[in-house]
Structures are given as structure tokens and as C-alpha cells.
Amino acid sequence: RASLTLTDAAGSTPASRTAAVNSVMEHLRDAGVVSGWRDELYPVTPSFHDPPLFLMERAATPFLGIQQYGVHVNGLVAGEKGED
């Protein structure tokens, strides 16, 4: 099983690890490696219900092999006369 190892310089808190990883991902974005940047921070966790180890740009998660989850919600709004 592959893993990502951060150096001690990345710190030991989710906030410090987020800053360290995002610094690298921003360089990759600026170099044209990461496209589709959304400014959407995605939680990186060991499993679905665990608290995040860090947050990172959602568009960059495939570069680290991170499983992504999302929810899509559709809805209808009734018009003034109650019709769709």
C-alpha cells in the first residue's frame, strides 16, 4: 500500500500539514501540472469517518491517489401558481 510521508517541517497539526501540502500543489498548478483548480479544500482522511489529517485542493487529489467522495443534490421549485 502506497503512502505519503511528510517531513517534520510540515508540522503535526492539520492546519500546518494543509499549508505545507497546498504550497506544493500551488507550485504544481502554476507550472501547469494541476488543472481545473477550484479553490475547494478537500479533507484527506485515513477512512471515510476519520477526522482530516489535512485539507488539499480537490483538483490535486488524484495526484496523490486520494479517494474522493461527493454529493449532488437536485431540486424543483414550484412557480407562483404551484406548477413546476
Image (cartoon, rainbow, N blue to C red):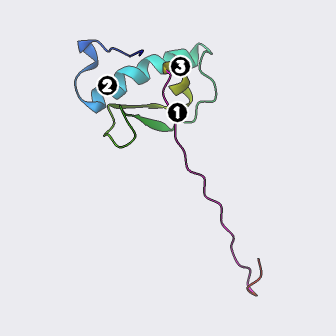
CB contact under 8 Å: marks 3 and 2? no
The amino acid type of the residue labelled 3 equals Phe
Residue, disc 2: 17
Give the magenta range: 65-80
Q: Check disc 3: other Cα within 10 Å, few if <14, some if 14-19, many if 20+.
A: few
Q: Please tell me which of labels 3 and 1 falls first in the chain.
A: 1
> Pointer 1: what residue?
58
The residue lying toward the viewer, choosing from 75 and 80, is 75
Q: Nearer the viewer, residue 62 or 21?
A: 62
Find the distance from the CA under tag 1 to the CA under tag 2: 15 Å
Lower sequence index among marks 3 and 2 = 2
Where residue 82 appears, as percent x and y from the top left, is 73, 85
Q: Is residue 9 left or right of residue 73?
A: left
Q: Residue furthest front?
A: 1
Which residue is pictured at 46% across the width and 36% down the height? 42
Residue 3: horizontal and vertical position, in percent?
A: 38, 16
Callout 2: 10 Å neighbours few (<14), some, many (20+)? many
Q: Residue at the spot x=60%, y=15% of the render?
A: 33
Cα distance in 3D space between marks 3 and 1: 10 Å
Q: Secondary structure at mark 2?
A: helix
Q: Main secondary structure of the magenta part?
A: loop
The residue at which mark 3 appears reads as: 63
Q: Nearer the viewer, residue 70 or 12?
A: 70
Please determine whether, in this image, residue 75 is positioned above or below residue 7. Answer: below
Judging from the image, what secondary structure is the residue with disc 3 in? helix
Q: Earlier in the sequence, mark 1 or mark 2?
A: 2
Give the quadrant of the N terminus: top left
Badge 1 crowding class, 10 Å Cα cut-off, few under 14, some 14 to 19, many 20 or more, is some
Q: Position of residue 48 (x, y in %)?
A: 40, 40
- SS at circle 1: helix
